[in-house]
Image (spheres, grey):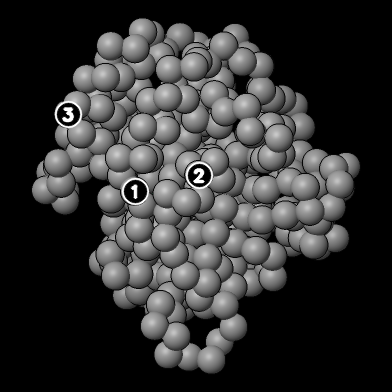
Amino acid sequence: AQKIIIDTDPGQDDAVAILLALASREIDLLGITAVAGNVPLDLTQRNARQVVELAGRVTPVFAGCDAPLARPLVTAEHVHGKTGLDGIALPEPGLPLQSQHGVDFIIETLRREAPDSVTLCALGPLTNIATAFERAPDIVERVQRIVLMGGGCFEGGNITPAAEFNIYVDPEAAKIVFGCGRPITVLPLDATHKALTSRDWIATMRGMGRIGEVVASWTDFFERFDVAKYGSEGAPLHDPCVIAWLLRPELFKGREINVEIETGSELTLGMTVADWWGVTDRPANALFIGDVDRDGFFDLLTERIGRL
Ligand code: BDR
Ligand code: CA
């Protein structure tokens, strides 16, 4: 099975991504590292433990960084609610928080496992991963691949006109990760805004027992806010695209291109400057996904969540 670490700021869509990974035998989830993002760290680490427990698993959860590398934290309660995981309220988790820091877990795991065998799946701001790379440069070449949700090209931004939330919150961290030299797959808004829930799919989830009901309540909550903001019909399941790409890359289309991160300009801070048309001679550093097979993606989710 593919060994992964999920770095995350749950987040309803992060939560669905975690469920998808836990439900998939092709994936060996070594641990979950929480980061500050959608809500502060004390909530994201708790939410991650609630999701693992909902799935009936004991995957270790670690708390990582509580603030971006160089800026104050920007959160997104306006999208995810006060807890970050609004919807059906889950019980206080019995699963304990690991005492090791999330960044130390990432470093130790990459040093312990065979080189090129662990993929980092990033579903939030890239603070934990960048901190691990800065603190332990020897681990960088041991990373198999980084698959991350973040950025946008033709789709523009969702937190500012130019920037997507995960990159905007910690652009300095994103710059470190995009410059690391290891293979990167980016699931930007161009793809994830096509991964929209439908009424039918939410109804299917609601009929699938306790876990399905919780998933339906999450996407219902998420949807209310997105309709107001984008006029779209459903809730975009951004972060599950990361796990779906690992499981079924043929559902996605993209290009190997150069992507640079804006860290200077106030107007376009956190923009992913993506050279889709190859107009520079800057070398490609990422597989940038532009499209997803929506039906195939939701069929995969239904099948896997049904297994839990
Ligand atoms: C990203 O930001 C968060 O609100 C979501 O969980 C997702 O990771 C979308 O821009
Ligand atoms: Ca997220």
Q: Position of residue 33 (x, y in %)?
A: 63, 37
Q: Nearer the viewer, residue 2 or 5?
A: 2
Residue 252 can be seen, yes or no: yes
Viewer-side residue, 111 vs 43: 111
The residue under label 1 is 293
Task: Tell me which label, 1 or 2, sits earlier in the chain.
Answer: 2
Rounded to the nearest whole Å, what is the CA distance between mark 1 and mark 2?
10 Å
Question: Taking 162 as reference, is 174 left or right?
Answer: right
Residue labelled with disc 3: 199
Q: Residues within 10 Å of mark 2 (few under 14, many from 20)?
A: few
Q: For the residues marked 2 and 3, what is the alpha-carbon distance in whole angstroms?
A: 24 Å
The x and y percentages for residue 289 are: 43, 61
Image marks 1 and 2: residues in contact by CB distance under 8 Å: no
Q: CA distance from mark 1 to mark 3?
A: 18 Å
Where 195 sits versus 210, above or below? below
Position of 44 compared to 113: left or right?
left
Ranked by sequence position, the earlier of labels 2 and 3 is 3
Give the residue type at disc 1: Asp
- How crowded pointer 1 is (Cα within 10 Å; few <14, some 14-19, many 20+) is rated as some
Q: Secondary structure beneath disc 3?
A: helix
Mark 2 or 3: the one toward you: 2
Vertical position of residue 281 compared to residue 269: above or below: below
Does 125 sit above or below residue 46?
A: below
Left or right, 175 with reference to 208:
right
Which of the two discs, 1 and 3, labels the residue nearer the N terminus? 3
Q: Where is 174 relative to 211, above or below?
A: below
Residue type indicated by callout 3: Arg
Residue in front for this viewpoint, 250 or 79: 250
Find residue 238 and report its horizontal and vertical position in percent: 38, 45
